[in-house]
Amino acid sequence: MTLRKRLLGWLADAALILYFVFALFPIAWMLILSLKPANQLFSTYFSFSPTLDGYRTVLGDSEGIPFVRFFVNSLVVSLGAVLLSLVVGLPAAYASARWRFKGSENLMFTLLSFRFAPELTVIIPLFVLYEKLGLFDTYVGMIWVLQLVTLPLIVWIMRSYFADLTPELEQAALLDGYSRKQAFFKVALPLVKPGIAAVSLLAFIFAWNNFVFPLILTSNEAQTVTVGALSFLGGDRPKYNLTAAAALVSVVPPLLLALLIQRYLVRGLSFGAVKS
Amino acid sequence: MIGLRGVRKTYGKVTALDDLELDVREGEFFCLLGPSGAGKTTTLKTVAGLELPDSGTVEIDGKDMRGVEPYDRGVAMCFESYALYPHRSVYDNLASPLRSPRYRVPPERARERIGEVAELLGISGLLDRPISQLSNGQRQRTALGRVLVRPARAFLLDEPLSHLDAKLRQQMRAELKAIGAVRRTTTLYVTHDSVEALALGDRIGVIRDGRIVQTGTREEIWYQPYDTEVARAFGRPRINLLPGTVTGGGFRSVDGKVELPLPAGAALPAQTNPPAQPSPPARVKEGTDVLVGIRPRDLALRGPGHELTGTVYVSEVLGRSVEVTVRLGEQHVSLVAPRADAAGLRPDDPVRVTVRPESLLLFEADRPQCPGRRITP
């Protein structure tokens, strides 16, 4: 019996290792690719003379592609989009969780429908509009259009967080002498902090990874890393090593952010607040 | 002081409050008693302004509270779910009202006041703890504390003792009314425990299906219950209700084995129900189906009064007294007698039971969905 158990354990371990290799291989491949010198790009697999030249080129604004600016653009645009969505979306989520008003459900559904319409279906009218309004290739334009990505996510997820919170907590605050606004800021909001952290991270990643909007609605000034990294593939010869280096650099911010707010991702703060 | 006039509240198809009428007087400790789902909590929340009535008015200090926000009503409420702020310590929970724009006091005064209240409720040692580390009983006391720290025009307490263990509950029940703040402040207290209501209430309101069935002092509720449900709600063991009919001289049970003279009207004080309640039928014709109510403590094994004979069914010692269930014809009645009187009683022993006619209560027969009303002699 114990032998069988141990055998099963080993089997499980082996399966896990296999999966681990399978899952990490693309990342390892990218890493290898990014460390290859340009002349060995197409002639080697695992044995080559590693070099950081790829990273140097990508981060050093050479070859006429301002990758660092794209990187900064991505940061500004993604953070801006998430912040705006939080400012607009948190009150919206709270209101829709607490009160049913005329058309509230339709409004919520409309918001959600932004997520299931493919971006490509609206991109041409958007492009024309942006051209006319002078929003083409600007931060404001990008932050605005990314609301289609971040806002529904934040409103819908935060709505369920607020709905989980018993309204009696805010009612208690009202009777303690606080206004409705104070009850929201002092009681409801602190209790959904883990939710805000999780959903912000998710929204940030979605905004960061968005490809279609920056591809069509920016050209140079507000272009982001997703589109920018591909610039290295143009020209007479695709520079896979530079693309790989750029891609790996652009993974860093979401990864750092995830590590930073890890402790908020663990829920359970509001646990035990209310007799169930 | 607190008045609800024709208050109606529905949630979808469910009627929570059905033209509810309620008056709580200045400085009074008023207990609202009813089973779960009767509308007790909705009543409190309507007074607090947390729920808005579909129709009817809520008055506090004679002023219509329509359009007055909860924080402007000056009432404090203790929630059955506690509704403590889970992200704050016990101290900060208690301090919450004292830091609010409406009831702000200087921090030193707040500290002093919180100290007093915590002492009173036996939670002084817990002030630094987060709420999540408290037991249910401790949470309940903290919730009560958050109500008591601040001045209020009225306290609204929703089952504030329900989660304490039996010993602590008894102790707190005794102490609650002695607390200065409670003595000075009009209190509307919601409970499903009739013992609590009898012990605490200056007056008691019995609520059922969103309506107040009866309001009165504990004596009125006890001696003149509005109907069989109210009679059954108070007193353990429960009131004995014998079905039968009215005869020329009194009452005869369905099986004909029990005959009782009907209570003489003079022995009972006059009816003092509020006029809003329909007054019970005044007289009964012969042959009417009725129920006769006898409190177990009004039956005795010896003593003056009308005599009935039966046999012992079962007896149970409750410390100094004994609960004896006696078979009278086809019905069982329970009585509570001093231990000495019941000594040596065995099942199937014949016994003589006495009852004084003036302690009898007469009710209409129960109908489905409609408990029999008491008939005024």
Image (tube, rainbow, N blue to C red):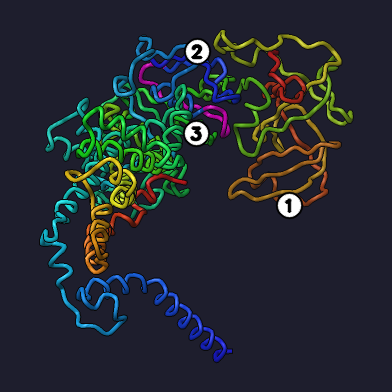
Along the line of sight, the residue nearer the viewer: B181 or A207: A207
Residue placed under numbered mark 1 in the picture = B344
Tell me which corner region of the image, top left, top right, bottom left or bottom right, holds residue A214. top left
Secondary structure category for the residue under label 3: strand
**A30 sits left or right of B249 in the view:** left
- Marked residue nearer the N-terminal end (1 or 3): 3
Residue A247 in percent (x, y) is at: 26, 62
Magenta span includes B37: yes
| Disc 3: CA contacts within 10 A as few (<14), some (14-19) or many (>=20) | many
**Amino acid residing under circle 3:** Thr
Tag of residue B55: 2
Tag of residue B191: 3
- Marked residue nearer the N-terminal end (2 or 3): 2
The chain containing the residue under callout 3 comes to B
Q: Which residues are magenta?
A: B25-39
**Amino acid residing under circle 2:** Ser
Q: Are marks 2 and 3 in contact (CB under 8 Å)?
A: no
| Disc 2: CA contacts within 10 A as few (<14), some (14-19) or many (>=20) | some
Residue B345 in percent (x, y) is at: 75, 49
Magenta span includes B222: no
